[in-house]
Image (spheres, helix red, strand yellow):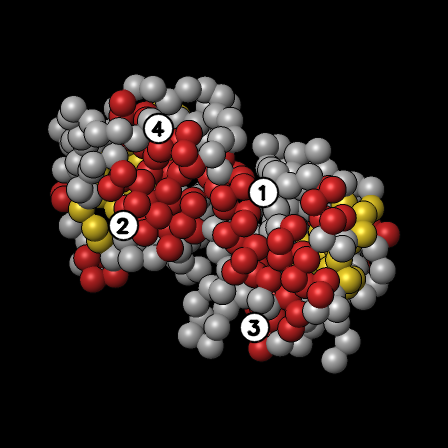
Amino acid sequence: MTSPHLWLRAETHPGERRTPLAPADTAMLVKQGVQVTVEHSSARCHPIDDYLDAGAESAPAGSWTDAPADAYVLGLKALPEDTAPIGGHHLYFAHAYKGQQGARELLARFAAGGGEILDLEYLTDVRERRLAAFGHWAGYVGAALAVRHWNGDLERPLRPTTKNALDAFLGKLAQPPRVLVIGALGRCGRGARAALEHAGIEATLWDLAETADLDREAVLDHDILINAVQTTEPGEPFLAAEHLRADRRLSLIVDVTCDVGSPAHLLPVYDRLTGWDEPVRAAADGLAVIAIDNLPSLLPREASDDFSAQLAAYLPQLPDGDCWERSRRAFHAALSKTGLNDV
């Protein structure tokens, strides 16, 4: 089987310093015969020289548009906004299969250009468990921001940091909040629990069993709700505006999942994401929300190295490994669902 050609593109999303492929794993792939091209990026947490030392070739930022037709363009966040058709093979988190804003337009560009998305969110095993994810660090950072907000020392704007520096703010609290983590057994939930434990907070932990018959009064009786539930289908909301009684205890929601704008949004008490400049926003009277869609970017080096180590084992299996076929089927199912499969 011919080894794939990977093309690591430069990210254009504001504040994004992560990468799906670290230099250490690049060196491993090159030794296996994989050709790796890395675009220059001043934002990426690993410098270009580390990739060149690992055996990769370099290319100008944004040159993925001229990459060979058989290259697999690897990234994380959205492609630059445009209306031009897209060809080739693209591995990234497209966020386009659950009815998100702009999803149909993006899929139409791929349909028109004959390209394909091998969405990393749908890179799964036979039991549909994700094979590579940033979930642990999303949960960890989300919980850490909640603690800092509660403690009154959450500085704005947020800036990339290291785990050691972040942990320095998570000392034992004089008056720890009551925290509920929903989705506590998954990657995100375990990450949130780790940060809370570091802060000396013993959280209430809910997962599938506890949400099957949701006790909203119990939800409202916590100071902080951390939502770490990953879902692909619409479901009964955990909280909507009509559930917010005036005498509730709940004052902060951290939505790690960030499915706002999607039918799968489980917390319709808010309708806009927050960001690095303003990480906390009022969602209702006395209720604030943190909903940042790139939380792991605040720990770019740790998050990138962890994700890369997970993903690298499956990259040599391109294009037809079972996990990639499952991702490919998800793409074609999304095209079919939106009526674009015959474009």
Residue 143 position within the rendered picture, expressed as x and y whole percent measured from the top left? 33, 38
The front one of 338 and 302 is 302
Mark 3 or mark 1: whose residue is earlier in sequence: 1
**Which residue is label 3 attached to?**
323
Mark 1 belongs to which amino acid? Arg
Question: Could you say where residue 140 lies in the image, as x and y percent from the top left?
Answer: 37, 42
* Residue type at the position of mark 4: Ala
Q: Which residue is mark 2?
A: 182
Q: Which residue is mark 4?
A: 168
Locate residue 179: give its quadrant.
Answer: top left
Which circle's residue, 4 or 2, is located before the other in the chain? 4
**Residue drawn where x is 19% and y is 43% of the image:** 203
Read off the residue under disc 1. Answer: 18
The type of residue carrying mark 3 is: Cys
For marks 4 and 3, give the CA distance.
39 Å
Mark 4 touches mark 2? (CB < 8 Å):
no
